[in-house]
Structures are given as structure tokens and as C-alpha cells.
Image: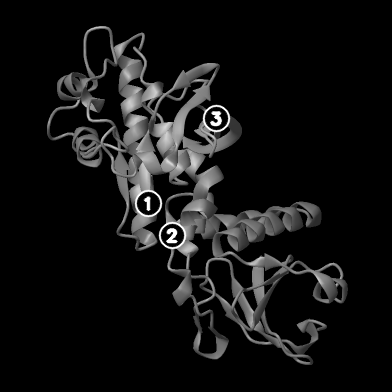
Amino acid sequence: MDIFFNELSVKTTTNDDEATEWLENLAQLGKLLKQIIDLLEDDRFSFRRKEDFGQQKITSTQTILEFLISKFGHSDPVFIFLLGIFDSPYISEDDPQKTDYDLTSITLGGHDYELTGIAAAYLKDSLVVSLNNDVQWNTCQLQISVNKLNEQAEIITTNERVKQASQSQHIVNCHLPFLSRLYNWSSYEPKFDPANKQQSVLVLVEIYSLYLGEDFDTVWDGFYHNVAQLNTNQRVSLIVDTAEKISKIHGWKKATGSLEQNNPGRKIYTIPRSNLIVSVDTQHGEFEIHNDKKGNNHLGAISFDGKKFKQKIESRSLTL
């Protein structure tokens, strides 16, 4: 996946501290994206920007490249990372695919722009990242008007949304399900064997753990400690919300029809292309795993972090 830089976000800062904050935020955002892509084992990931990215002014006297050199130095991780990720331009005027898109311009904030990072992200169903995080860009989606030519060579305008991030929290709060589409789901074969404590149901646990924090080794201990302190309503709400996020990361589907109707009060998900069904234990914060057969279909349970297994309990079977 290509991640496009929105050069419209480059503005002259009021002071060096603000410019430093912008560049540090961008580096942190980029590192998080690279971490996620590596976990997804996708080797097509790259940041894309205009060729003159480093020559744009970030202060009244310095370009981005000049500021990086003067404030961070060649050995600073921010300097190394920013120079390393912005190594190729996105859709340029001589791009052989440019004419295939029939995109004349985009309109943002009442102004028309030619091909930009925003447009490239829209065309390629990707993300656009911005340098500054002021009110204008501090959002997970940008509303744009796309101006295209139809078959009669008339300009038509449609309103679209572009996935946007200017801080790491935007990625975690908004875009993890989108990025998780990069996982090779054709190889996803969920299996559950509580007797041998083996499972391949929660394959992206390190991805959805980011909802809680970056330290995978400790975040779930904190989660379950918190669950134990809550009253019933609070506990159920937190567990259901967390389970919903995990289900979106894995592409599970909410139960409908007779499966939902025959099991009132239970949160249930089906796993596409699988004979397994998942229900949520709202008391302990676990996934109960079932097969899709009538009768005693409860196979056991597993904690959200994939570490603790429980054996089957026939009374927890679903009515199919």
C-alpha cells in the first residue's frame, strides 16, 4: 500500500518549536504505520510524496530539509526516518496511468487543486498523511469534491471521503480495520484446539492490541485488571466494545437471521469461509468458540489476548 503525503498541509510555522513538533509527529506516525505493515507482512508498503517535499518552506527562513539538518542532525532518528520514507513521488504529470483516472481536479475548502496527495489517496483507496495537526487536518476523514470527465467529456462532481491521519492516534482510532485488509486473508484458516492450547482464530492480536497501547506484553494485563474493577454494566460495555473492534479487524460478520434470533442476549459473529462461530463472554472478556453443528457445539474459550484457553462447556452451546 502507498501512503501519500498531503503537501497542502505544509504551512509556515510561527516558531521552531511548532515545526519540530510537526516533524516529530509525522515521524511517529510513519513509524507506527511501518510497524503495522510489517506485522501484516505486506511488502508493497511505501510513502509517496512530491519530488520537492524537502524544498518546501516550514519556517519563514528554512525549508523542511534545511530544518531537519539544523534541528535534528544526520544521526537523529527523526532525520533518518523522514528522509528514508519520502523517497519517490506519487502520480506525476508523466505517469502512464494518469490519463486512466480521468480526474481533472479536486475541491477542498472551496479551492480547486490538480493531482495532489489527497487525490492520489482517493484514486488508490489509500491513506493521506499530513504534516501539521491543526484544526483543519485533525480528522480521520477529509471531505473532498472530485471533478471527473464523463464519456461526453463533461465535468461531473461527486463528494468523496479520503482517509486521513496527522497523528498516530488517528491510525489507531480510525484506520486499523482498513489497514488490516492488507493481510493475506486467503490463507486465513481459523482453527481452535484448547486441549493443546493452539489457535489461529486471533491472527492479528498484535494489531488490535494497539487499541489499548503499544506495549503488547502489558496492555492486556491492564485491560483485565480494569475489567475486574467495573460494575456489571460498565464491564459488559467495555467487553462488547472491545470484541466489536477485534471482529472488524478480522472481518467477522455479526450474526443475523435464526442464529441471532435463537440466541437472544448473546453477541455472536460468524467467520467467513470457516465452520467456526464466535460468541462473546461478556463476564470474563473472552471469545467462546463453536462449530456450526447442531447440538453440543461449544469447543471452548480463549481470552482476547489469545493467551488463556478454557475447555468446552456444553451448556454454553449455541442453538442453531
Outermost residue toward the left in this view: 74
State the separation of the CA atoms marked 1 and 3.
Answer: 32 Å
Q: Is residue 216 visible?
A: yes
The image quarter in which residue 50 lies: top left
Q: Tell me which amino acid carries mark 3.
A: Glu
Question: Seen in the image, is 277 located left or right of residue 5?
Answer: right
Q: Looking at the image, do the residues carrying marks 1 and 2 touch, with CB atoms under 8 Å apart?
A: yes
Residue marked by disc 2? 182
Q: Tell me which amino acid carries mark 1.
A: Met
Residue marked by disc 1? 1
Looking at the image, which residue is at 37% across and 39% down? 99
Residue 25 rendering spot, x and y as whole percentages: 37, 31
Secondary-structure class at tag 2: helix
Residue 84 rendering spot, x and y as whole percentages: 20, 40
Mark 3 surroundings within 10 Å by alpha-carbon count, few (fewer than 14), some (14 through 19), many (20 or more): few
* Quadrant location of the C terminus in the rendered image: bottom right
User: In this picture, is 6 found above or below 90?
Assistant: above
- Return the residue nearer the eye: 236 or 166: 166
Residue marked by disc 3? 154
Specify which label sits upstream in the sequence, 1 or 3: 1
Residue 166 rendering spot, x and y as whole percentages: 44, 32
